Amino acid sequence: MTALLDVRDLHTHFFTRDGVAKAVDGISFSLQRGEILGLVGESGSGKSVTGFSILGLVDAPGRVVSGQVLFDGEDVVTAGEGTLRHLRGKRIAMIFQDPMMTLNPVLRIDTQMIEAVQAHEKVSRKEALARAREALVAVGISSPDERLESYPHQFSGGMRQRVAIAIALLHKPDLIIADEPTTALDVTIQAQILAEVQKLCADSGTALIWITHDLAVVSGLADRLAVMYAGRIIEEGTTAEVIGRPLHPYTKGLIGSVPQGKRHGTTLTQIRGMTPPLLDLPKGCKFRPRCPRADDQCLTEPPLGPVAGGRRVRCVHPHLEDQEDAVLS
Amino acid sequence: MIVYLVRRFGQSLLAIAAMAVLVFLGVYAIGNPVDILISPEATQADIIATTERLGLDKPLYEQFGIFIWNALHGDLGNSFVYGRPALDIILERLPATMELALVALVISVGFGVPLGVWAGLRPTSLAGRTIMGGSILGFSLPNFWQGMLLILVFAVLLGWLPAGGRGETTEFLGLEVSFLTLDGLSHLILPAINLALFKMSLIIRLARANTREVALQDYVKFARAKGLSTRRVVLVHILKNIMIPVVTIIGLELGSMVAFAIVTETVFAWPGMGKLLIDSINLLDRPLIVAYLMLTVLIIVMINLLVDVLYSMLDPRIRLSEMKG
């Protein structure tokens, strides 16, 4: 079976006045139908740009310079605006980070939902409205008729994100790209939205790319994880493996910096320093200046190499010696 | 809604009252009209008689009191020069100015908004930069000079359009208008463009700046991610957002266009209120100046009130019902 989404050596660069920022610099991954992939990384690691590249929504001065994004066998990168328009919202939907900003403040919810339906299907306004209503009910919004006639500012953040999710689900897409959709929400709402999305995706067999910087959120949700750093994937594997036995020092650092009940009273591990600016990346392994294991061998950047069990890691000195539960103890 | 309107109306009345005081004092200070009105050979007795006839011998507070009392009864005094009610003379000229201002407004919005949005969507393109460059000329060149150049090119050199006057008028809703006859329209085009150029440049810049800002918003990207056509994204999602600041400016500028079309009316000999004001100032025709300024204030205040109501229609976040508190 061919993969639903196959990203091959994607490079998305931003041509700024100060130089070329390689926000995404050669990433490859694939996604099967119904699979949930967690794309994890710090701010500026290129995870959101990856999401936008898949939809062909990278704004100037950025552009995809090379690589392929094969969606159902068809290359999105070389596709024209017309083809892309029929893909967007219909087969690939996106949910954004900040629900306060994703809905147009001067248009009513019904307008924004009806136009989304009618963008892809020739249906009457009435029918589109019925579909919109259905979608709102599906994401757990009570009194949908009243809600449809409201403006975004009359909704709470969690409600708005539900509306955004409802819009994403309108056409039962094959793939949803969720760009940190719960980051801006309260923890309780976060959990509700997570459960909601998980259930809806499972029901409809929709594949999901969940972009986040929060390992705790994604570990309960994703089938597989890809950890990004400075525009590259540095480690990839099943969620259990990556969380349970991180191979890359960066992943290990990330997991170590999440507070856990088990380690109560001990000092949290920190990753030294900051993410390097994209315009001034270090030579060799991009994590080298912050890495406790770095040595001269790291001056040449290692490839994303395969390790046992279908995992891949981009490191000269991966944590292969660690026992499975050594990390958590 | 009603509470808001009443309060807003009260503010408007206050503004008008304050203006009445300022206008009256200001006009009182600019000189004695009797010196100009009366012939140089007049005797002292004539001067005193005229001064008494015009009520200028009374102390300032009494003159002001009479003015306010009469104004409250809808009487802004008789023109010293024409000897008829000042308001009537102005109202005769008002339709010409209003027509000019409204046509100029239509031109400045009709061209300004699309050009501005275009420049905002493609800020680095040749077209975008040309539009911006042109708009700089539009509001930096003096208005009267633009007017004279328009006359020079289109009336004198090319001879396509008349240089001045109002042309043939027809009655429309009880008012004399030019735009319905071909001759009137040809007279209207140049002054309207002249009056519109500055505002158009302003609207272009405003629309461009706002388009650039709005185009980067998440909701525009989200609209695109929904698979909407570019046309719908621009015409609905972007346009409705940028119209809020544009309407503000239109409101402010329409007032000033009606009130201060003076330069254009003078250059094109357009028989409107602006030209009347210039003549009245030269003759120190106090009641006419005062009446003109009061009417202008009234128009501007009313337009602002209208703009506030329009806002609420454009932006649901400032619905009037929420302004009660």
Image (tube, coloured by chain):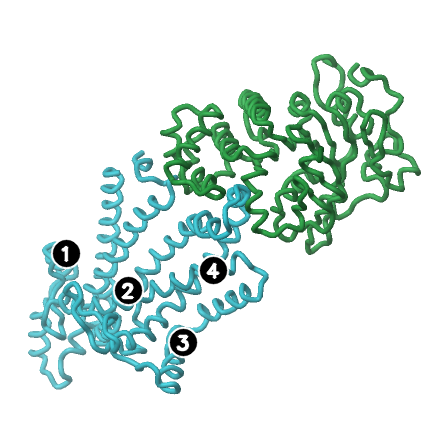
Chain colours: A green, B cyan
Q: Amino acid at mark 3?
A: Gln
Nearer the N terminus, badge 3 or badge 4?
4
Real-space Cα separation, disc 2 to disc 1, in angstroms? 22 Å
Real-space Cα separation, disc 3 to disc 4, in angstroms? 21 Å
Residue holding disc 4? B116
* A279 with respect to A177 (left or right): right
Are the residues flagged by discs 3 and 4 from a single subunit?
A: yes
Q: Is residue A183 visible?
A: yes
The circle on residue B259 is 2
* B268 with respect to A231 (left or right): left
Residue holding disc 1? B68
The circle on residue B19 is none
Which residue appears at 44% of the width and 60% of the height? Answer: B114
Which residue appears at 23% of the width and 45% of the height? Answer: B10
Are the residues flagged by discs 3 and 1 from a single subunit?
A: yes
Residue holding disc 3? B146
SS for tag 3?
helix
For this orientation, the residue located farthest to the front is: A1
Chain letter of the residue carrying label 2: B
Along the line of sight, the residue nearer the viewer: B225 or B174: B225
SS for tag 2?
helix
